[in-house]
Amino acid sequence: MPQLNGDTAYLGSLDSANYDPIEHLNAIFSSPSSLSSVSRTSKALRIYQHELDDEIAVRVQQQSGSDVDSVKRIQAAKADLAELFQKVEGVRQRAIETEEAITEMTADIKRLDNTKKNLTLSMTALKRLQMLTTAYEQLRGLNSSRQYRECAQLLQAVIQLMAHFKSYRSIDQIATLSRNVSDLQREMLEQVCEDFEITFAKAEVGQRTGMLAEACLVMDALGDNARSRLITWYCNTQLREYRQLFRGSEEAGSLDNISRRYSWFKRMLKTYDDEHAALFPPSWRVNELLANAFCEGTREDFKGILQRSARRSDGQTLDVDLLLSCLQETLDFEHGLELRFTNTSRASMDTLSSNDEKSPIFSQAISEAFEPYLSIWVEAQDKHLSTMIPKYRSQIPRQPDEEFSPQMVISSSTELFSFYRLTLAQCAKLSPGARLVELTKVFAKYLDQYAQQILLYYVSERPSGQTPSKTPQIEDLVLVLNTADYCYNTSTQLEEKIKSRIDHEFKSNIDLQSQADTFMGIASATVRALVRRVEVDTEPIWREMRNTGWSKMESVGDQSSYVGEMLSRIKTRATEILGMLHKQQYARAFCDNVVELTANAYIANIFQCRPISEVGAEQMLLNTYVLKKGFEDLLTLTSPPNTPTPPGYIKRVAQSMSRLDPILKTLQVRPSPPEALVQAYLIHIADKTDANFRKILDLKGIRKQDQAHLIELFQVHCASPRNEGLQQSSPILTPLAVGGPTGGGGGVHIPTGLPSLSTAASLRPSSLPARCDPSTFGSAIMTAARDGVDRFGYARSREYGEYACGFENGESAADGEEGAESGYSAVAGGEFECG
């Protein structure tokens, strides 16, 4: 739009999308003086309107012309498309006409081709029919003259030719010829069988070997049924004498004569190899099928014999020795057959890949009959083991003249597992199924008995004729510890070995972990018994501590006199014991428990030293620091110089001894002001139990009438919101009971770190226990074993294999006693070696 200049305001573009005429007019005529430009503005607007009209007219004219051109182009395209369709239709019509012309031209050629094809088929069929007829006539002549080699070749040709005429059997002549061929095949089959029967009846096999071998070629051509008939006849003929000789009801058929059965068949196989093997093609595997037939018949005989023996009216049972002897002979016989036929006849029919994973041919072919009666054998092993346990118990762990070695184990354990190994190998061969499960239960039964009646018996204090109780020597305790460790590892290996030998469906029934845990419980008990030696050595030292006047001390000096003596005695005994422990995990367990025992005993004796003054508590705290520093090198007493102490052990010492700090630090605070003592208790002991707070007050010697105010103040503080997070009872103070004054009654019970095994810190002021209570010691050990004693970081690990023998090495019963000696050999000096 043209711009209007002069006094009027600026006129914006009328083309704006958001054009507002009111605003535009207000902008143009913003004042009264601008009204003078109304005519000029109106003129400008009319000019702009005319220009717009002209422009619109031009655009409309241009668009009208463009539409006409488009319509013309569309009409032209439609005309071209119609013309194209006409041309396509014309081409299609000409193509149809051409095809019809070509078909008429080639119809005669197709008829000639069909005629040629039919003529060719007819000529081929006639030629084959002529060949079949000729071959049939020749085959009849050859068969009558028993020329079996030529018959076999010609018979194959006749069978192949006859297959081409299956679709022509509706023709009478073809049907007649087919019947004639079938009749000839049956005639040849009967003739060959008759020749075999006559030849064997007259014992003329040697003279007619060639003819019979060629006759077998005919049977091969006749098919599988013919071949099976001849083989079945041969096997029955050869085994007829065996069945007559060894009927189950006759004396020759009894179990006593089982070796005669196998000897007879071995002679039969030798006869086959020498005289009859040349008659049959190797691919028939006649000797293997003969062996199968023998095994099947013998198995059924044995089943009947064993059933009759088990149902004897005179009450006698099967002779276990005879049963095992027969079974062993049977297994040896089956093994011999397996070796013979796996290496010969099977190799010729199996592929190379299948040879690597062939299943046994004769495994349990006869021995299956013995399977239901092997429970008698398992019972025999049970009875034998029941006689071994009392014998082992009557033996001493080590002969007096036998030199001690830290690696020694009790000889009876190696003897027991050697028997287990040989029995397992034998049973796995006899029956890797349900009977092996039964045998495993017998193993588990006597492992439990060995643990409880032998090892636990050795480690327990027991009455003797001269003294109230007989305490095991340290060497004997170490011997029991080594044996328990050996039994733990070997039991685990025994379980794995059984699982590797047993049938897959029975693997879930094999579990000796409970027995392994029992042996680990024995090991824990033995370590506790060794710690008991340290406990006995330190009893006079604790008495000296209780006799010290802790309430009358005026100042803190150097360590108390009993501390140095205690460390000296502990280290002397520990040096002796650690020198005998050849496994680091047991040395660590021993030291851990010595530290735990000392810490618990210290806490127990603190409660027997009442009253304790603040200075006395500070002196006790100093003594605990000295003990802690002394215990840090306990584990390395027998190690080479400059051997670093494991950080884990140092941390364990700090944790054990730090349990004394809360009590002693609380006792260091004076009862006045009372607020300070209560706060100290809440900070160090940190529980809400009134009874435990009274124990601290009793230890400090505060009179009962003076305790009421302190207890009331304690209760107020416990009810405060900021003390809501305190524990309900302290695990240190709660099990403790404050006794009377020094030398008085009262009792304290603190666990020592061997779960469910120890009453080590069940100390009384007047009479500290001088020995373990054997009446409860055994049940405590068994309880700990059942709970799974993984005290020494085993986590049922398989890594401790120094004593692992036999079951990891895969020996079998075939190794005999030599295998036992190599698997378990007790060498000079008592050390135990692995094969």
Image (cartoon, rainbow, N blue to C red):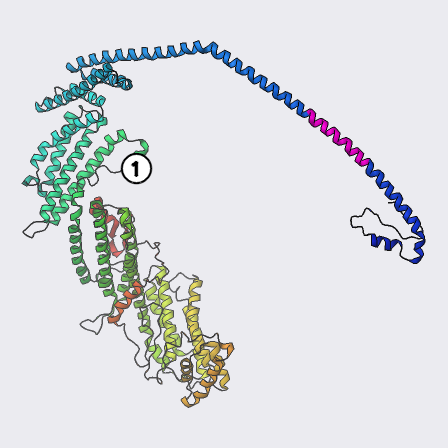
Residue 262 inside the magenta-drawn segment: no
Residue under numbered circle 1: 357
Q: Quadrant of the N terminus?
A: top right
The percent coordinates of residue 800 (x first, y second) are 34, 55
Find the magenta span and give its range: 58-76
Rendering coords of residue 208 (x, y %): 13, 19
Relative to 792, say whether 366 is above or below.
Answer: above
The number of discs equals: 1
553 w.r.t. 498: above or below: below
User: Residue 294 appears in which quarter of the rendering?
Assistant: top left
Rendered view: 211 above or below 438: above
Residue 224 versus residue 485 in the image, above or below: above
Q: Is residue 82 left or right of residue 411?
A: right
**Residue 344, quarter of picture:** top left
Secondary structure under the numbered disc 1 in the rendered image: loop
Front residue of 448 and 27: 27
Judging depth in this view, the residue of 197 and 253 nearest the camera is 197
Q: Is residue 63 in the magenta section?
A: yes
The answer to whether residue 806 of the structure is visible from this angle is no
Q: Residues within 10 Å of mark 1 (few under 14, many from 20)?
A: few
Instruction: Give the image location of residue 720, x and y in percent.
Output: 50, 79
Q: Quadrant of residue 430?
A: top left
Residue drawn at the location 32% of the way across and 11% of the way down: 122
Horizontal and vertical percent position of residue 318:
10, 49
